[in-house]
Amino acid sequence: MRLKGQIGFLFIFITLLVFNDLYAQNSSTKVQGMTLVIDPGHGGKDPGAEHRQANCMDEKHLNLRIALKLGDLLEKYFENLRIVYTRKTDKYVSLEDRVKIATANNADCFISLHINANEKSEVHGVQVHIHAKGYRKTERLAELINKELTERANRSSLGIFTYHDRKGHLFVLQNTSMTGVLVECGFLTNEKEEKFVNTDYGQDILASAIFRAFRSYAQEMKYNLRRHPISVYRVQIAASANKIPRTDKMFKKVGLKVHEYKDKKNLKFPYKYTVGRSLKSKDIQKLAQKVRKKGFPKAFIVKHNEYPE
Ligand SMILES: [Zn+2]
């Protein structure tokens, strides 16, 4: 994005942090769940950074794609995380309206998504912007996003930027403990990065890195977020009144890693032994057939609800 736009946006962005901080002080009774605002930068008449190469998209479209992918991952994972988007389509939303959306929804956290541009095509890497150091939650979220983007998503990073790094232009604001970050997911002016963010794969990588960072952040900050349970299928090969030792010939015969668990509800045969683990019942049906042929004719499929890690 152009420098002028960037300063303007960050001005509003920081204002948002203050509004939310004031609001947060009045809502300490709120213990259930959490509200996250996902803010895809630009939109409609404002394209943000424009595409350079053929078959590539302008920044506004890419921001939205990454934002929707991020929201999708979060919605599938968390049961009581409320996600509010500042836009879900290609429409223009003013910076003032983005602030209004976040404040009206009493957001706990704000993540803005952008893609950078620079006069020099060699400049590349992700950037995470925060207002200033010293705001523990914001700083931590920024660190985690930067870490996931570099270590797991393998992006190069220019680092975490505060208003000091940006040489001022922003208010020195006190008491901003509200979480808020702006992620620049690379440079459209860099050939490689423009190609990367224009692929579905690249957008997935970026979104999942931010997802993982947010998940760690929510855990660390002890937000009361519940995960959606998922159904997992396994093939049960045995149940026993007593623990079966690992050296038992049964384990050799099946030739697969055997999972043991204790079913406290079953008083007679609490120790259960299963093989395989899949989210798809079809896959596990095939495995059950194989296991039955291996000398476990009574093997059957069990379905458990598990919480993803
Ligand atoms: Zn932008």
Image: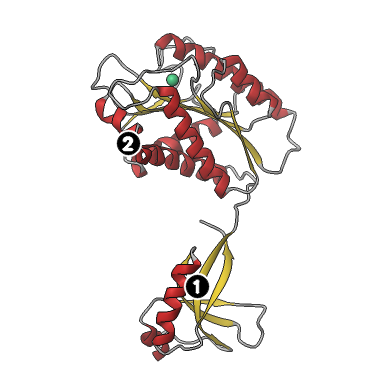
Q: Secondary structure at mark 1?
A: strand
Q: Which residue is mark 2?
A: 155
Relative to 37, residue 211 above or below? below
Q: Examine the image and state in which quarter residue 294 appears.
A: bottom left
Task: Give the residue type that dot 2 points to.
Answer: Arg
Q: In terms of sequence position, does the residue under pointer 1 or pointer 2 come before the other? A: 2
Q: Nearer the viewer, residue 165 or 252?
A: 252
Relative to 50, residue 247 above or below? below
Q: Position of residue 122 (x, y in %)?
A: 23, 22
Question: Looking at mark 2, is its residue's CB closer than 8 Å to ligand 1?
Answer: no
The answer to whether any part of residue 258 appears in the image is no
Disc 1: CA contacts within 10 A as few (<14), some (14-19) or many (>=20): many
Relative to 285, residue 34 above or below? above
Q: Secondary structure at mark 2?
A: loop
Q: Quadrant of ligand 1?
A: top left
Could you say which disc has been placed on residue 40 in the image?
Answer: none
| Residue 66 as seen in the image, left or right of residue 123 | right
| Residue 172 as seen in the image, left or right of residue 224 | left
Determine the residue positioned at 73% across, 38% down.
30
Task: Give the residue type that dot 1 points to.
Answer: Arg
Q: Which residue is mark 1?
A: 234
Disc 2: CA contacts within 10 A as few (<14), some (14-19) or many (>=20): many
